Image: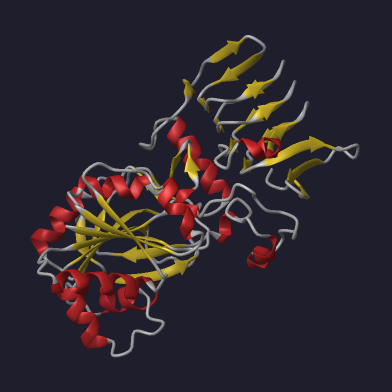
Amino acid sequence: MIGIISAGGYGSRLFPLTLDKPREISRKKGITEDCYNINSLPKPLAPITNCPMIYSPLTKMKMLGVEKVFVTIHYQKEKFPYHLPKISDLEIILTSPRASSTDELLKFAKQEIAKGYSGDFVYMNADIVSNIDPMPAFEAHKKQSPLVTIVSTPVTGNERRLSAIKTAEKDIYEPVQEYQHKSTPKEAKANKRNASIYFFSQDFVAWVQEHYLDLSGIELSDHIFPRLASSNNDLFFCYKTNVFWLDVGEIDYYLSAQKGSLHGEVEHPLHGKFYRKYQTYYEGKYSVTGPTLIQEGCEIGNGTIIGPNTVIGKGWMIGNNCQFQGSVLWPNNIGEEYNNCFLIENNISLNNCAVGSGHILRTNENKVIVSNGEKTCELTWE
């Protein structure tokens, strides 16, 4: 089978972690011009524990037996070759420029069909972390042979926006009756949400070409899925699952993904020294409460208390009497010459923060300040 992963977004909801140029800051309100991350990465490469989040969809492609996967990239695309996880026996093809999701899917589908490919296609988003086993959904798709099968998870009520899916609620695999894109939980007419795993038959390509003469501005979730759902002719099916699933969009969701990985709720690599949960470890001059992960090359001062639910990447120099809980410090991936941008002064407390880089200190006004090279800003991620 051939796979496609969409990884071309700007990650604007994770700014300033994904932002390395102050002039782009206008993409999100409430962030000052001096707030950015000298160590930024595009969202699909943002680390969950110490492995990029795109690892999750890549491993699902591997589970399905995919041999070739196209990864569509755009924002900070030059960083992908250096940070993309390597998955054995999986050919990963990086491709740009970024197009709409429909254009991406049809482009690669038609290209491979022209080469003689006669199977189905699987499409996933790069910013989803989950324990979903995609194989049962694919087996159901092959047996029923609709144009599209979409995987769903339950609505939790904590979502800010979701794509709601309505079915008859009789079986685990059923036709989609209604599809609402980007609804609020209150607006949603169903208790299932899009899990961003889709299976497409080859006939889907012909159906789109027949129903849309002009694909300009046409998107899967905005246009095609609602139209398929309203057709009432068994072209669009939903496979339901209820395992751990998270759209890693905003900072709080990102921290939840870290916590889920540390607690073993989601399968994701833990590179570094892992302190197991419900225990406190005394490392000479500092202490650690698990679950916590600390990578190599860190210097930690006297009296510092770390954890639980904390990830400290490689290369951080941390002062005396600091406290960290539920926070993530990204590893230094830009070299020793930037060590002064991975430095935390004495007596700093960080709770539920995500910091990509910075020289962090406390001012006389008792404000926590982050300095990335020549720029400084008040730390506002608490």
Please indicate whether residue 246 sits to the left or right of residue 140 in the image: right
Determine the image quadrant of residue 150. bottom left
- Quarter of the figure with residue 347: top right
| Above or below for 99 versus 46 | below
User: Residue 213: image x %, image y %?
Assistant: 28, 90
Identify which residue is drawn at 48% across, 63% down: 9
Residue 218 position in % (x across, y down): 37, 80
Whether residue 23 is visible to the viewer of this picture, yes or no, is yes
Depicted 99 relative to depicted 357: above or below: below
Residue at x 42%, y 30% (from the top left corner)? 270
- The colour scheme of the drawn protein is secondary structure
Rendered position, 216 above or below 368: below
Which residue appears farthest toward the front when viewing the image?
A: 337
Looking at the image, residue 381 sits to the left or right of residue 207; the answer is right
Farthest-out residue, bottom: 213
Residue at 38% from the left image edge and 64% from the top image edge: 164
Q: Is residue 130 left or right of residue 281?
A: left
User: Can you say which quadrant of the picture contains the C terminus?
Assistant: top right
What residue is shown at x 43% (from left), y 65% (from top)? 188
Residue 305 drawn at (x, y percent): 66, 21
